[in-house]
Amino acid sequence: MSTNKNLLVELFVEELPPKALKKLGEAFASTLAASLQSQGLVAAGAKVTPFASPRRLAVHVEGVAGKAADKAVQQKLMPVAVALDASGAPTPALLKKLAALGADASAVPNLKRTGDGKAEALFLDSVVPGATLAEGLQRALDEAIAKLPIPKVMSYQLADGWSSVNFVRPAHGLVALHGEAVVEIKALGLSAGRTTQGHRFEAAVSPVTLRDADSYAAQLESEGAVIASFDARRAEIARQLAAKATEQGLQPIDDEALLDEVTALVERPNVLLCRFEPEFLAVPQECLILTMKANQKYFPLLDAAGRLTHQFLVVSNIRPADASAVTGGNERVVRPRLADAKFFFDQDRKRSLADRVGGLDKVVYHNKLGTQGERSGRVRAIARRIGDQLGGAVLADAADRAALLAKADLLTDMVGEFPELQGVMGGYYARHDGEHEDIALAIEDHYRPRFAGDALPRNPVGLAVALADKLETLAGLFGIGQVPTGDKDPFALRRHALGVIRMLVEGGLPLDIHRLVGDAFAAFGPAHGQAQAEVGFFLRERLAGWLREQGYSVQEVEAVVESRPERWAEIPKRLAAVRAFAALPEAASLAAANKRVGNILKKSEAGAAVDVQPALLKEAAEAALFDALGAVQPAADAAFERGDYTESLLALAALKVPVDAFFDGVMVNADDAALRNNRLALLRRLHAAMNRVADLSRLAA
């Protein structure tokens, strides 16, 4: 049995795509280790350490065997009747099968006879030799390369001038070390060795000759000036950013995606402090921050109040004794970017948003839904109705004005250069134009929430316009059949639906969802019945999913959502009430009875009486239920009307005994039609009383 040793595999390549590097490194390591495990070369749970730098993908796996253990296998050959003749001698068919498996007639006496279905069959016991590390690692490396989540494959020619291979970037080196020994494998036209390259400019030794698998990270750092681990390099950048910012009494902007991208661009991070001219701070800080982050990969520095300062941090890949050339170069590079932003801002303010509105009629929104101007008209109509419901004519007028101006910043130079700033720039320009602060905030916020966890609009005007904008999008696109399918959602309609849900529920808006959807479709004109129903179903489906993510059970969510409440702002209170009711000892029995009542009513004839006639209550149990309902319902209804849903449901607990007695002692479907209809009317009243807050039958086991 060979001794287990640690394994190191590295592919040295040209600069990898930075936004994909982290995922490539993790996939390379996990796939290669999983393949080794499946071949019996490494134990389950062995420690696997991925490495990923701009020019390398590598993995360190602990406890890898030089050879996998042999495996005993039993292989079915054929039925005994086919394998042996009448005298028990092997038939030609059996000898041929044995030969194909590397055995001969001498194996026949050792074959096992075992019942298999209707007939006995012969089985051959054999031992399959375990894979050697060279064989298994070759297979694992081939699989890891084939399964890499490569964004875009390159085809390049090998050194022989004839062969070509496809990979994410041209590969120039392969390392495979099992302990101190090189494992002889090949990949991408390369043979494995023990040498790799360090930093392009700052490596102390070139190439770096690795002593063994365990010295990889340490040697690369000390001799090659490279931090090979993505996580370690990221942590070092974060540490340097925080330290350099603290020296200035400032804080770097928090951006995990930017930190990941910069980690993928450098091998030996060195954070440096740079500055730009303070006069650029007259430009909205969102513009400056975006241009520094997106175009230059810089980290803007903020003061304690979160305001942008004229200082920023860069992550250099070199550590010169005198860094002035590096900082000066970065300061020169950023200046034209900031000057462009200032120019756009100054030019845009020469025309008001109101002056730009007419230009939206020339911008196509969707070839089946018209222009941005037409869309703005629809959003205005919906926003005015929402505003009227939330705050009367004053709020309706404000929502109308904000909706009129909300899309005008799409025609500005700044948004043309930075589409991510739409809405934000509209808010700045609205203030410059002298619009009321409520209008400016609404324009700025009307795309919110843009993503899960994003803040909601900050005032009622913004909520009205944001709701209108998302509802118009849903109604328009569902109306032309652009419905999300599977994982395809090109217009982000699931995100729009979630935004509507969060504004209604978290914003506590006293709005009727059915009326909202109806108003949205009304803005498009008549004949959208099917699409309107689809939007309603889509919103309920997203609502149920969102509530489950908040920690409510499937039964709790179904009980509330399937009862079709009109005002979703009340849903948290309804869910709390259902949870409190479900904890009662009477809950299970009442939920089961409620389900039974529902099934009976579904099957009953349509012409049953509407009102219960006390004179027809012949059985003591039905009279007792009628009396109990009369005693309980007023309190339950009063609690419901004042919004105390928990109290409303808890009041129903008193019905358990009379409900159980009713089903034990009363035949609902009596032969006498008058009695039958009266009992159905009693059950209808019971059903209505029990299901005002939620559909309690959903709690039944």
Image (cartoon, helix red, strand yellow):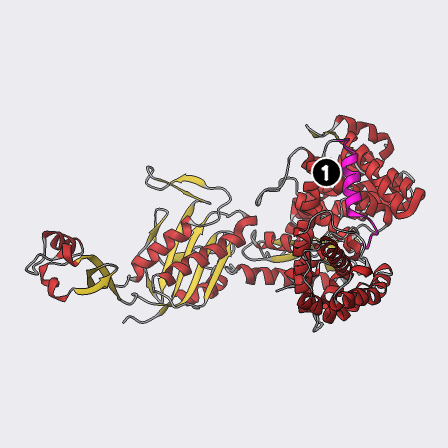
Residue 357 lies, with reference to residue 616, above or below; the image says above
Q: Position of residue 509 (x, y in %)?
A: 82, 52
Residue furthest out toward the right: 394
Task: Please tell me how many numbered marks the rendered image carries.
Answer: 1
Q: Residue at x 28, y 62 (%)?
A: 132
Asked which secondary structure carries label 1, the reply is helix
Q: Position of residue 6 (x, y in %)?
A: 39, 67
Q: Is residue 659 left or right of residue 387?
A: left
Return the residue nearer the eye: 494 or 656: 656
Q: Is residue 266 left or right of residue 60?
A: right
Q: Is residue 676 left or right of residue 95?
A: right
Return the residue nearer the eye: 57 or 668: 668
Residue 376 lies, with reference to residue 668, above or below; the image says above
Q: Residue at x 81, y 45 (%)?
A: 444
Q: Residue at x 82, y 39 (%)?
A: 382
Residue furthest out toward the left: 87
| Residue identifier under label 1 | 475
The C terminus appears in which quarter of the rendering? Answer: bottom right
Q: Position of residue 553 (x, y in %)?
A: 65, 62
Q: Position of residue 661 (x, y in %)?
A: 70, 69
The crowd level at tag 1 (other Cα within 10 Å; few <14, some 14-19, many 20+) is many
Residue 431: quadrant of the picture = top right
Q: Amino acid at mark 1?
A: Ala
Q: Which residues are magenta?
A: 507-526
Return the residue nearer the eye: 628 or 556: 628
Residue furthest out toward the front: 672
Q: Residue at x 12, y 63 (%)?
A: 107
The N terminus appears in which quarter of the rendering? Answer: bottom left
